[in-house]
Image (cartoon, helix red, strand yellow):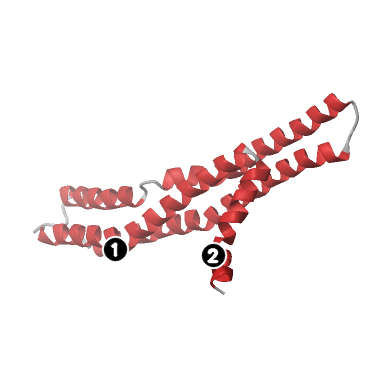
Amino acid sequence: MLDAAIEKLLWPSGAVSSLVGEGGPFVVCIFLCGFVMWTLVIERSLYFALVLPLQVREALAAWQVRAEHRSWCARQIRRAMISRVNTAMNANLLLLRVLVPLSPLLGLVGTVSGMLEVFDSMALRGSADARAMASGVSMAMICTLTGLMVSITGLFPVYYFSSRIRRETELLGDRLVY
């Protein structure tokens, strides 16, 4: 029973290693891209849960300490406070937005590489051997599948963080009353 539980826990690592073995070196690059992407997603989640509330409280406290809120200078200070918090919220989001479309592009490079292997084996043998073609096509499809899988998992976090940044910026602007 313990062996069955351990086997079920280790199944994902076996599936990943078989994908890497069958898909070639581009799958490793795609998984590294996915690892960096999900590290950034976790970092941004921790930022929004732990750091952002402190930054908002600090900005509100600094605004409340000001005696005057209506002058041009006060409005520029308010704008700078909102901009600082917005910049902190947008940190690493650009890299996350780049990593999402990078995965299928790496998959496409792997696909082209696999198809080149197919054509190479056909040229060496002088005929279209189905077995030789199958390994190259399999490598090509595994690269494509892996790139799409990694990319699809990153679409929602990018959309979520973008909309959350807009919402939090508007809320902070509403809370810093003139």
Residue 178 located left or right of residue 66: right
Residue 33 located left or right of residue 26: left
Tell me which corner region of the image, top left, top right, bottom left or bottom right, holds residue 25: top right
Q: Nearer the viewer, residue 18 or 52?
A: 18
For disc 2, the neighbor class at 10 Å (few under 14, some 14 to 19, many from 20) is few
As measured in the structure, the alpha-carbon distance from the residue carrying label 2 to the one carrying label 1 is 48 Å
Residue 126 in the image, given as x and y percentages of width and height: 89, 26
Residue 174: which disc? 1
Residue 77 located left or right of residue 111: left
Residue 13 in the image, given as x and y percentages of width and height: 56, 55
Q: Is residue 62 visible?
A: yes
User: Residue at (16%, 47%) from the top-left corner?
Assistant: 73
Q: Is residue 98 shown above or below 173? A: above
Which three-letter amino acid code belongs to the residue tagged 2? Leu
For disc 1, the neighbor class at 10 Å (few under 14, some 14 to 19, many from 20) is few
Q: In what element is the residue under mark 2?
A: helix
User: Residue at (38%, 55%) from the top-left corner?
Assistant: 44
